[in-house]
Image: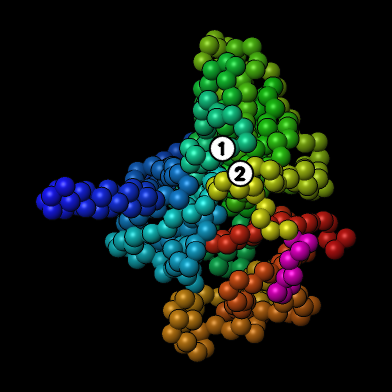
């Protein structure tokens, strides 16, 4: 072979290696979202809502494991706006998480480009506004991460996929609701429930087929119970973790929680009610949608399936949650079983007990953790930490366990170190259900019980 031919061969090999390297990089998806106000009729009366690209709820963000997202968000509201990606792990890029302290809100008529990766994740998630009570006006949407084709899932591929964003809803403008909270008062009872931003929805499937229903509670404060007339729900995933596949007649879904169930359309061809109703409320709110068999000529009939008997039965809900078990023999986003760590063999670096409360501070109702009611500083926490700016926050205000002292105001931060394993105990002394927003890291539930037994 001549020198010219050898040179061509070398060039060809280099070109093939270069192509392989390019193809090996995880895919990128690019989006441009514009946030505006609009007028819609979620509960039959006109009200201002927050739209993303003209949609309420916002666009469904469908990703595949390891895909990168480049999302340019343009804020056309009259006040700063910020989105958080609930459940997406932010590995060494916490400034993409979209909450105060790590992200600065996007000013009106400005934009910000989010950059994050669904690295080694699968599952059902949501995004929503994290400031100014914007969530009460919309701006939320579904975020689904699908498995790579080379990674098997522990159930046959469903014949279809439905996303249901369920939540309580107020007819009152979000700014008025915010003023109510700022004045030291609690919010009134919500006006209704919505499924995908509507009071009535229809989901169509074929008899004999199995469909995945991805159910997320996107409300402000109210737990819901979800059920489908004449059908059982096979739970297969809870926020990115495959579960042991138990069957349920209904599921409690709490604020911020997302679950995925498989439903087989095994009934005679007819329409069936999909029902969501509030839990632990004096006055139950109910909304219905329709599961429509494609070959059905019959409307949904009969009584709407009933919720659990006792609307205040926290134990029923807790007992159900205890039946959720990690499927440790199933793959997750990687080709190895879930549960790489065995809790009994881990020595926690520290144990933190966090108790929520609702004290009166300076004559005004506020909410606190371990007696500290958080106030956001003018300087973002991330900047203060990076540049070692003193006096912005304190790592000594919030103790590692509750105190019985009076509530007080402060900018408190809990300090940990990289690679720490932390045991966190959440203690709810109030007579209402509480939800905690945990983001950016891995969290494993290792146990829970009534406060009487802690």
Question: Which residue is rendered at x = 69% and y = 22% of the image?
Answer: 230
Q: Residue furthest right?
A: 453
User: Which mark, residue 152?
Assistant: 1
Magenta includes 320?
no
Is 293 located above or below residue 307 in the figure? above
**What is the count of numbered marks?**
2
Q: Is residue 336 left or right of residue 280?
A: left
Percent position of residue 265, x then y:
61, 20
Magenta span: 343-354
Percent position of residue 142, x then y:
49, 44
Question: Which residue is rendered at x = 76% and y = 75% of the image?
Answer: 402
- Can residue 157 be seen in this snapshot? yes
Dot 1 and dot 2 residues touching (CB under 8 Å): yes
- CA gap, disc 1 to disc 2? 7 Å
Percent position of residue 244, x then y:
71, 40
Q: Is residue 197 left or right of residue 232?
A: left
């Amino acid at each position: 072979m001549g020198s010219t031919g050898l040179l061509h061969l070398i060039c060809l090999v280099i070109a093939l290696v270069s192509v392989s390297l390019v193809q090996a990089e995880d895919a990128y998806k690019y989006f441009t979202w514009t946030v505006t106000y609009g007028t819609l009729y979620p509960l039959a009366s006109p009200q201002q809502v927050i739209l993303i690209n003209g949609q309420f709820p916002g666009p469904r963000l469908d990703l595949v494991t390891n895909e990168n997202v480049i999302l340019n968000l343009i804020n056309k509201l009259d006040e700063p706006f910020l989105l958080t990606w609930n459940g997406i792990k932010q590995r060494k890029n916490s400034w993409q998480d979209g909450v105060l302290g790590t992200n600065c809100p996007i000013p009106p008529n400005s934009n910000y480009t989010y950059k994050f990766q669904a690295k080694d994740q699968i599952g059902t998630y949501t995004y929503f506004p994290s400031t100014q009570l914007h969530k009460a006006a919309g701006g939320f949407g579904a975020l689904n991460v699908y498995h790579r084709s080379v990674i098997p899932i522990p159930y046959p591929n469903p014949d279809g996929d439905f996303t249901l964003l369920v939540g309580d809803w107020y007819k009152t403008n979000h700014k008025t609701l915010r003023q109510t909270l700022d004045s030291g008062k609690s919010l009134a009872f919500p006006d209704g429930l919505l499924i995908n931003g509507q009071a009535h929805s229809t989901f169509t499937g074929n008899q004999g087929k199995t469909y995945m229903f991805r159910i997320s509670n996107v409300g402000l404060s109210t737990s819901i119970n979800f059920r489908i007339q004449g059908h059982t729900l096979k739970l297969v995933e809870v926020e990115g973790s495959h579960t042991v596949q138990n069957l349920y007649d209904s599921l409690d879904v709490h604020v911020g929680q997302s679950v995925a169930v498989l439903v087989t359309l095994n009934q005679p061809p007819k329409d069936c009610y999909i029902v969501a109703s509030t839990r632990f409320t004096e006055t139950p709110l109910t909304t219905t949608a329709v599961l429509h068999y494609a070959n059905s000529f019959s409307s949904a009939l009969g009584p709407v399936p009933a919720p659990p008997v006792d609307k205040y039965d926290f134990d029923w809900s807790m007992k159900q949650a205890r039946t959720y078990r990690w499927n440790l023999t199933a793959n997750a986003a990687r080709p190895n079983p879930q549960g790489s760590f065995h809790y009994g063999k881990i020595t926690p670096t520290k144990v933190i007990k966090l108790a929520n409360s609702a004290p009166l501070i300076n004559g005004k109702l506020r909410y606190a953790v371990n007696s500290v009611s958080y106030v956001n500083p003018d300087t973002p926490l991330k900047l203060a930490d990076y540049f070692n700016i003193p006096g912005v926050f304190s790592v000594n205000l919030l103790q590692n366990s509750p105190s019985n002292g009076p509530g007080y105001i402060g900018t408190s931060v809990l300090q940990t170190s990289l690679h720490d394993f932390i045991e966190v105990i959440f203690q709810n002394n109030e007579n209402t259900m509480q939800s905690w927003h945990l983001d950016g890291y891995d969290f494993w539930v290792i146990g829970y019980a009534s406060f009487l037994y802690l």
